[in-house]
Amino acid sequence: MKKYFFFDIDGTLVYGEGEKQVFPDSSRYAVEQLQKKGHFVAIATGRSHAKAVDVMKTLGIHNMVHDGGNGYTIDDEIVQIEPLNKELVLELIEECEEKGFLWGISPENTTYRLCKDERFMEFTHDVYLDTIVKKDLDPSSYPQIYKAYVACRAPKEQELETLKKLPWCRFHETYLFVEPTEKANGIYRMMDHFHAPLKDVVVFGDDLNDLGMFDKRWFSIAMGNAKPQLKEKADYITDSVLNDGVYKACVKFGWIDEKKR
């Protein structure tokens, strides 16, 4: 029976960051065998399409839910990317300016962000995204904004009232991402595109931004290294990414054959 697999990237299919990112052989094997068996395989990530497409290609995958569920790609072609609510993002930036928070934006599908103040990088020391400083940066001049970033340490963000109206996540100690967090929305759209039943979906994840895609209408698998909140919602908990968790779960449920030694 054909299944539709959706894999988070960081902490699920791969581990590490930037140049130190590692793609376990077991993950590659599992993805390859699932596709050979006739299953549908996709990435489900909070990353922008531009930031995730290289991972997709490296793993030999051609489908992806990206931008936190606001976009999806089929057969290597972007079908849709919805931006954030621009008015709310502009309101948040105005509040950041008033209260002294450093900020950045991604108004296009690129691997970099734009900042108005070079102190953003001095504060965050971030290696995840390249940063271009534009002293005259005017967020309102762009037709859309896909992501925004606020430099602060927890719980400082509680001072930002507008942030309560927007989806956001924190993956780094020094700044947070204002981005869509409902990967399930992208999964719904993709399954509707194929007219396929939701009960045939299988998702793998490890972090808090995967909570939304751990839906009771399909089968959810948490990695052994997953956050406790995600494990509580999971239908099954596999081993960690470092211990071949994806591969072991796929073998256990008979979706792929065990690799010959």
Image: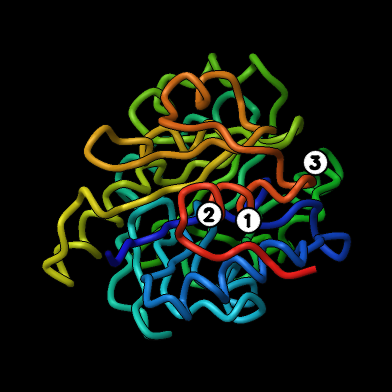
Decide if residue 243 is on the left or right side of residue 59.
Answer: right
Using the image as rendered, state which of residue 1 and residue 160 is in the foreground. Answer: 1
Amino acid, disc 3: Thr
Horizontal and vertical percent position of residue 30: 60, 65
Q: Residue at x 22, y 54 (%)?
A: 188
Task: Give the residue number, with chain letter if any, for mark 2.
Answer: 250
Query: Cβ–Cβ below 8 Å for labels 2 and 1?
Result: yes
Residue at the limit of the structure toward the left, as seen here: 195
- Residue 124: mark in rendering: 3
Q: Residue at x 43, y 76 (%)?
A: 37
Q: Residue at x 56, y 54 (%)?
A: 251
Amino acid, disc 2: Cys
Q: Secondary structure at mark 2?
A: helix
Q: CA distance from mark 3 to mark 1?
A: 35 Å
- Residue 149: mark in rendering: none
Examine the rendered structure and indicate whether residue 101 appears above or below residue 140.
above
Task: Give the residue number, with chain letter if any, for mark 1.
Answer: 247
Ranked by sequence position, the earlier of labels 2 and 3 is 3
